[in-house]
């Protein structure tokens, strides 16, 4: 009996590099990638994807949430393995975030076609609107497909020009209220595998080209609103002030100490002062606090501590404080045995960060799938200087080639395991 064909023997990682460069040229301006979801460059990128797939015997279509799928159907009863990521980018983004996993998936499909690989039904997915750059809802397509989307709330989201998400998706023939029907596409998945750049500096520091994260961090996002009293900058004595801006500034610094104590991260990325004039003490200050930790219980402790610190600061400054929950997401673990398989697949191609307990600090579509119970594993490719969401985002071409080969080997292994399971 001849051994079954292996995808890893047929993929060409250099073709992935070339395709990525072509895509970047076609959908970037001088200030970086412009493939923002629900805009023309994004549609152009997806047209390019269809064109790249057009010569292959795969069925291409778009689901109710706008996710694009290409399927190479395997033998009857074969397991279903999906690979993919997202073509959309942030404005002025990089050439690899998301695009890497989609273009590498195209290469896997091509390898499967030329080798007549029959290990599984192989699906490639380009998730719609992973970044949430225009409407603020990250993981839109994968959330819809995994039952995590609140369609009523999503439909009302507005972009900077006041256009609602409902209207923007209707222009592309989609309806927010029926996006959940895309769940049919993930219901039968035996594995979902996502190749992505790390977007952080850990691998570079560890001297590793590839890694397989164990899961993703827990996230809490809250708005802190301080209310004091406006006063003339030139006539209100310092000790008579109820300065909401000063309270917010103190909190912005204090949460870093809380995060350090717990080994997590805390970020105040927005701060608004009102009335917002140079000559008045701020009567109001609102800041958004994003806190992350690999462990749910440690994040809960961080959230409690930062709340207590905020209350102390408010009392000390003589201002009122209201804390509003905005959004939260639990820590997610990927499939432990698939992660182990991913580490082995990666180690066969390049130096890996085996001793680094890597947990993704950023959300990915794979996280939504893992949360919905799909066996998931990710492969991270080292980022140069840890930079991402920037035109300076880059990875070494050799690392991209190694990542593509590791993804192919992982798909081989995921298919083999699923076949074995279904026979058992
Ligand atoms: Zn991404």
Image (cartoon, helix red, strand yellow):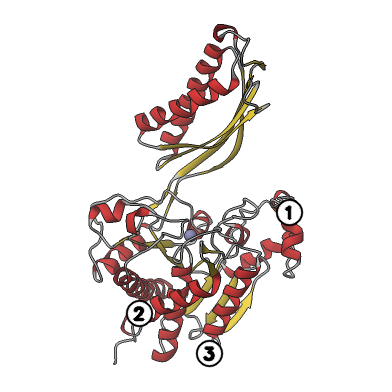
Classify mark 2: residues with Cα within 10 Å, few (<14), some (14-19) or many (20+).
some
Question: Compared with residue 321, is residue 40 higher up or lower down, i.e. above or below?
Answer: below
Extreme residue toward the front, this view: 234
Which callout, 3 or 1, points to the residue nearer the camera?
Answer: 1
Query: Which label belongs to residue 57?
Result: 3
Pointer 2 residue: 14
Q: Position of residue 57 (x, y in %)?
A: 53, 89
Measured Cα–Cα span from mark 2 to mark 1: 41 Å
* Residues packed near mark 1 inside 10 Å, few (<14), some (14 to 19) or many (20 plus): some
Q: SS class of the residue under badge 3?
A: loop
Tell which of 117 and 28 is nearer to you.
Answer: 28
Q: Where residue 296 sits in the image (x, y, percent)?
A: 44, 39
Q: Quadrant of residue 151?
A: bottom right
Whichever of callouts 3 and 1 sits on the residue coming sooner in the sequence is 3
Q: CA distance from mark 3 to mark 1?
A: 36 Å
- Viewer can see residue 190: no
Determine which of the numbered discs, if any, sits on residue 155 in the image: 1
- Residue in the picture at 33% in, 59% down: 384
């Amino acid at each position: 009996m001849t051994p079954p064909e292996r995808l890893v023997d047929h993929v060409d990682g250099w073709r992935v590099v070339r395709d990525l460069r072509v895509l970047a040229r076609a959908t970037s301006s001088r200030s970086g990638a412009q493939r923002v979801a629900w805009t023309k460059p994004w549609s152009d990128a997806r047209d390019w994807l269809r064109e790249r797939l057009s010569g292959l015997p795969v069925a291409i279509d778009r689901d109710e949430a706008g996710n694009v799928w290409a399927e190479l159907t395997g033998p009857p009863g074969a397991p279903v393995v999906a690979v993919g990521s997202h073509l959309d980018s942030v404005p002025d983004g990089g050439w690899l975030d998301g695009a890497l996993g989609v273009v590498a998936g195209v290469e896997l499909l091509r390898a499967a076609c030329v080798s007549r690989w029959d290990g599984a039904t192989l699906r490639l997915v380009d998730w719609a609107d992973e970044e949430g750059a225009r409407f603020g809802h990250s993981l839109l397509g994968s959330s819809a497909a995994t039952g995590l989307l609140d369609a009523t709330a999503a439909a009302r989201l507005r972009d900077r020009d006041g256009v609602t998400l409902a209207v923007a998706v209707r222009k592309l023939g989609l309806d927010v209220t029926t996006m959940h029907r895309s769940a049919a596409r993930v219901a039968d998945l035996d594995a979902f595998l996502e190749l992505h750049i790390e977007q952080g500096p850990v691998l570079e520091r560890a001297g590793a080209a590839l890694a397989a994260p164990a899961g993703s961090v827990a996230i809490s996002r809250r708005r802190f609103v301080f209310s004091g009293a406006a006063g003339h900058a030139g006539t209100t004595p310092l000790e008579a002030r109820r300065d909401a801006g000063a309270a917010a500034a103190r909190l912005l610094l204090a949460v870093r100490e809380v995060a350090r104590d717990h080994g997590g991260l805390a970020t105040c990325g927005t701060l608004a002062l009102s009335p917002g004039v140079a000559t008045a003490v701020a009567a109001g200050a609102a800041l958004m606090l994003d806190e992350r930790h690999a462990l749910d219980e440690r994040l809960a402790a961080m959230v409690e501590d930062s709340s207590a610190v905020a209350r102390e600061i408010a009392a000390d400054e003589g201002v009122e404080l209201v804390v509003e929950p905005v959004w939260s997401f639990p820590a997610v673990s990927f499939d432990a045995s698939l992660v182990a398989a991913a580490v082995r697949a990666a180690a066969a191609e390049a130096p890996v960060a085996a001793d680094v307990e890597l947990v993704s600090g950023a959300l990915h579509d794979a996280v939504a799938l893992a949360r919905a119970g799909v066996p998931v594993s990710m492969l991270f490719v080292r980022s140069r200087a840890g930079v991402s969401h920037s035109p300076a985002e880059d990875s070494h071409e050799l690392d991209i080639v190694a990542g593509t080969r590791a993804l192919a080997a992982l798909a081989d292994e995921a298919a083999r395991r699923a076949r074995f399971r279904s026979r058992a």
